[in-house]
Structure formats: C-alpha cells, structure tokens
Amino acid sequence: RSKPAGPGPAPTDGFKVAGTTVKLNGFFKTWASVSRYSGGNIAPESVGRDFYFPSMTPVGGRNEGNSFESHAKQTRIVLATDTPIAGHSLKGLLELDFQVVPGTQGNQRVVSGYNPGLRRAFFTYDNWLFGQEWTTFQYIGALPETTDFIGPSEGTVFVRQAQVRYTRKLSDTLSLSVAAENPETASTNLVSAAVVENADDRLPDVAARLNYKTAFGEFSLAGLARKLTIDTGPLNESATGWGVSFA
C-alpha cells in the first residue's frame, strides 16, 4: 500500500516560507587593539581607530601616546533567500554589521551602542543582479585573509555600491560580468586636504570583469570607465577616467 504524497523533505540548509528557502547566518565578533601613536593621536570615535587607513595615519605631530580599545560592532547578520519561479531562480541577500562611525546609541563609557550599517543588499534573477554589491571592478578572491577588518587598503580596490550587473558563463573556465554602477566624484583642493563628496555625477560607472579558472587558481581582468563631474556654481568641470585591474 503506497503512502500519500507529503509536503516533501525539509530543506537541509535554512527553512521554508511559502516556497522560499530562507537562511540566516553571520558571526559574532569581539575585537581589541593596542595602538601606539608617534605622530599625533587619531581623533576619538574615528574609523581610523577601528582599522588601518593610510590616509588617517597621523604624521608630523609631536604627541606620543598609547591606546587600548575593544568592541563587538563588526558582528555580522546575513539573510539570504532563494525562490524558484517557473524554472528560474530568484535569490536575495541582505548583509548588515554595526561598523558605523560614530554610533548614536550610546558611547564606550556607558552602553557601547552602535547603529546597524548596510553592507550588501541585492537580488539576482538567473544571470542578472540588482542592488548593492561589491563593485564588478573588484576581484574579491584577491583579498588576503587578515585579522584586520579591511586588510591592505592601500593595495586593493575596495568599494560596495548599487549596480545592475549581467554575468554570462562563456565556457567551463571563463565568465564575463558587465555592470552599470553608482558613480560618485570626490574632490579636494590645495587649501584643505578634506575630501568632498560632490554628488554631481550624470552618468553611471561602467565596469567589466573577465574571470578565468584554472586547476591552480583563478585569474581576473577588469576594466572601468567613469565620467567625473563637479558643479558647484562657480566651478563646473568634468573629466573622463578609466582603470584596469589584474588579479
């Protein structure tokens, strides 16, 4: 005697909600550092105290000092979904942490509260991606494993931004990705070293990356084209920029 058809086996990873597989993951992280400054202290609550930014390293000062700091704001939460639609796959991903400086929910002296910060938020439909993800120009596989949150920031491309990306597999070893991404032209001047975000861009960044897999590793060749624009009234300038990356 046969058994009646049931709802099917439960997913081995995640849980089902109305036909959508939902996965929750992430990690808990506690971080501590001891720093010694010989060219002047980094400002309190500065992102430069949390990880290494060359541009924030104090130079030319005469103040020496040491500091000890610890926090848990690099703890991460990830929500992923997968929904089959008529033979196609609709997937979504939301990734948050609390590495937002400064936090407005308290301070290190009282409750050490930190605001959630958006890292990645996108959905994919087959070969298309829509939303905020690592830029197509960056090859994530080239980032080394380090205990620092960013790693060698002066030696790598590093940006996450909104984009529309199309990826096509050309062969078993070769794939091509092309994307239009959110632009942002920053500037500075001879008087002040402060970086200004202008928000005057009129065209998206265009990026493309070719990945080639081999038995001993993967190679990446990427290109980037940009239109940089500044329009402050008295100053109206634009320029074309481009870049190439090999990893």
Image (cartoon, grey):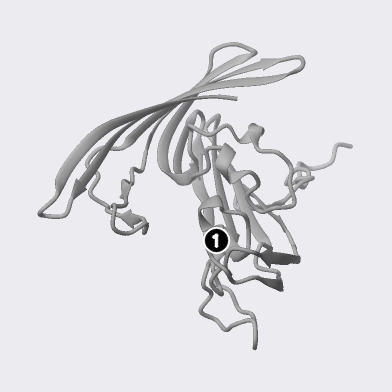
Q: Is residue 164 above or below residue 187?
A: above
Q: Left of 235 or right of it: where is 226?
A: right
Give coordinates of residue 236: x percent, y percent: 14, 46
Quadrant assignment for the N terminus: top right
For the view shown, which residue lies furthest in the bottom direction? 110
For the view shown, which residue lies furthest in the left direction? 234
The amino acid at mark 1 is: Pro
Q: Is residue 240 above or below residue 230?
A: above
- From the viewer's side, name the closer residue of 119 and 3: 119
Give coordinates of residue 63: x percent, y percent: 59, 72
- Kindly identify the residue that appears in the image at 52 percent across and 58 percent down: 56
Quadrant assignment for the C terminus: top right
- Kindly identify the residue that appears in the image at 66 percent across and 62 percent down: 74
Give coordinates of residue 198: x percent, y percent: 27, 53
Give coordinates of residue 78: x percent, y percent: 64, 55
- From the viewer's side, name the closer residue of 238 and 169: 238
Quadrant in which residue 239 is drawn: top left
- Kindly identify the residue that appears in the image at 25 percent across and 37 percent down: 203
Counting the numbered discs, the total is: 1
Residue located beneath label 1 in the image: 58
**SS under mark 1:** loop
